[in-house]
Image (cartoon, rainbow, N blue to C red):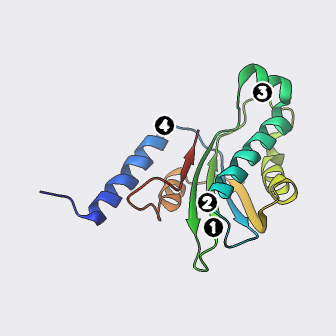
Amino acid sequence: MYASAKSRVVDLRAALITMFQGREFAYFATLTFTNPKIKEQAAFDALRMLQRLLDSTFYGKTRIRKHGKQVRFVGILERNYHQGLHWHVLISPLPPVAKIPEYLFCFYVTHLWAKKIAVAGPISECEPLRNREAALTYITKDIKSNLDSLYFD
């Protein structure tokens, strides 16, 4: 009559993967924090700040005020084996109006994360997305029965 907790998690993962199938992603990033005891709210605030920094870097403040956010994220906040938080993030491709070439995008993601986000950790990586389904499966691997660790816009 009732689904097991394990089958509900599998159903939740499948629903998330299906939901994000329709979105276009071009990059995969892992973003870490210096303090392993960082609060989840601070981690969400840091990711929002990175998104604003990328928007203003690539599009300028005038365009953002006029047209809204351009850089889109889907992120899952998870704990590593040391219980430290980190983000796995899928990032949308850049529209053609970007002020900076697309091949520099990953450099800017890791540079802005390391230099402008106070709680950012020393290890972060960003790369062009090669396998969309594998990335979606990977970032949803630790989804439990709630969506508190999910960030998307």
Give the CA distance from mark 2 to mark 1. Answer: 8 Å
Residue corresponding to mark 3:
64
Horizontal side of residue 16 vs 114, given as left or right? left
Answer whether labels 2 and 1 touch (C-beta < 8 Å).
Answer: yes
Answer whether labels 4 and 2 touch (C-beta < 8 Å).
Answer: no
Residue 26, compared with residue 6, is above or below; it is: above
Residue 22's disc number: 4
Decide: few, some or many residues near mark 2? Use Cα within 10 Å; few <14, some 14-19, many ≥20: some
Q: Earlier in the sequence, mark 2 or mark 3?
A: 2
Q: Which quadrant does the C terminus fall into?
A: top right
Residue corresponding to mark 1:
85
Q: Earlier in the sequence, mark 4 or mark 2?
A: 4
Give the CA distance from mark 2 to mark 3. Answer: 27 Å
Residue corresponding to mark 2:
40
Front residue (pair 60, 94): 60
Horizontal side of residue 17 vs 113, given as left or right? left
**Residue in the image at 82% along x and 31% along y:** 59
